Image: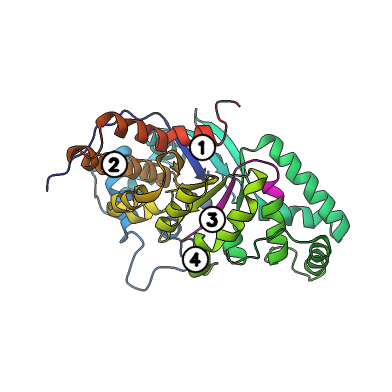
Amino acid sequence: VTVTELTLELPALVDQHCHGVLAGGPAGRAAFEALLTESDAPPAPGTSFFDTQLGFAVRRWCAPVLGVPPHCPPEEYLARRARLGTAESTRLLLRAAGIGTYLMDTGLPGDAPASGAAVHTLVRLETLAERVAATAPRADAYLAALGAAIERAARTAVGFKSVAAYRHGLDLDPAPPAPAELWTATDRWLTSGDRGRLTEPVLLRHLLWSAARTGLPLQLHTGFGDPDGRLHRADPLLLTDFIRAVRPTGCRLVLLHGYPYHRNAGYLAAVYPHVYADLGLAVGHTGARAEAVLGELLELTPFGKLLFSTDAYGLPELYLVGAVLFRRALARVLGRFTADGSWSRDDAERVAALVAAGNARRLYGLDGP
Ligand SMILES: [Zn+2]
């Protein structure tokens, strides 16, 4: 097979959406495998999560970084990893990933993946609301404390993140809730005995609007993820009326993950000036097919509005695999565009640098206002 790969001089990547690394490392093979899947269940009897595109990608790209042959069996890889220890494996894998900046969603436990990299914070709205509810269990006090907490968060974070897709679905009423509706829903939630997990759609809408009014970018989970959600209710097209309604606030919306609706996200980014599309998560999980997914995103998404991320969580392997597969997919897709004369080499290099880092630096103001 002839593959035209473009040799690209990329800037250090900006991972615009990721989570922490588990510092203690996974305890054994089952715990490691559980982090290779979005499923919350063990693999089917007689199967392994290593037998997936992501599992294959880990064996291909992480094994040589830890000093074992590419494609070596999982047992050999995990034995080598255990011999090196979690701290040393993590250091080697993160160094090889070539990520210069992490924007970290603090909604899940874990430590910043950095060693020498810049780390910025994305505040997860639902987690913030649940924390406030634990200390302000009455509607008036809760709403005031929540407003103050969002304002405080906006002073230090680079953006907000919402998992409304998991908690309810993106088929929310697009308008900001009226005060009476908001108060009644708040009171209902706080007195329901289930303050631990926010699923009340009126309150989820209130969070989205509160974040939008801060002027910081708002990341929204869309597309595939863990089985908490119903995938068909995570299609970003369900956000169309919200996207229109929120535009006057000046808030920029980042549609995360997207797969298998990434083309829909690309369409929304194409027609609404304040919408951006992300290609994280899908890249790692589609492995040898990442090139196809990136190619589809580059069909409609304006080149100044596509953002790289890994959505890595827990395992340092996921940062490396996300970064390597992204660079490789980019080199191949742009290699084809230039080889057949559709794109100039200069344009390909400029777009590659935008997606790898430049778009995120501009969107989140990482180089100052
Ligand atoms: Zn995430």
Say which of marks 4 and 2 sits in front.
Answer: 2
| Residue at the outermost top position | 368
Say which of marks 4 and 3 sits in front.
Answer: 3
Say which amino acid is labelled 4. Answer: Asp
Q: Nearer the viewer, residue 167 or 227?
A: 167
Whole-number angstrom distance, CA of label 2 to CA of label 1: 20 Å
Query: Which contiguous range is marked in magenta?
Result: 210-224
Q: Earlier in the sequence, mark 3 or mark 2?
A: 3
Q: Secondary structure at mark 2?
A: helix
> The C terminus appears in which quarter of the rendering?
top right
Q: Earlier in the sequence, mark 4 or mark 2?
A: 4
Residue identified by numbered label 4: 40
Asked whether the residues under the numbered discs 4 and 2 touch, taking CB atoms below 8 Å apart as contact, a structural biologist would say: no
Residue identified by numbered label 2: 328
Say which of marks 1 and 3 sits in front.
Answer: 3
Q: Residues within 10 Å of mark 2 (few under 14, many from 20)?
A: some
Q: Earlier in the sequence, mark 2 or mark 1?
A: 1
121 displayed left or right of 176: left
Q: Residues within 10 Å of mark 1 (few under 14, many from 20)?
A: many
Q: Nearer the viewer, residue 199 or 197?
A: 199
Q: Earlier in the sequence, mark 1 or mark 4?
A: 4
Residue identified by numbered label 1: 102
Say which amino acid is labelled 1. Answer: Tyr
Whole-number angstrom distance, CA of label 3 to CA of label 2: 25 Å
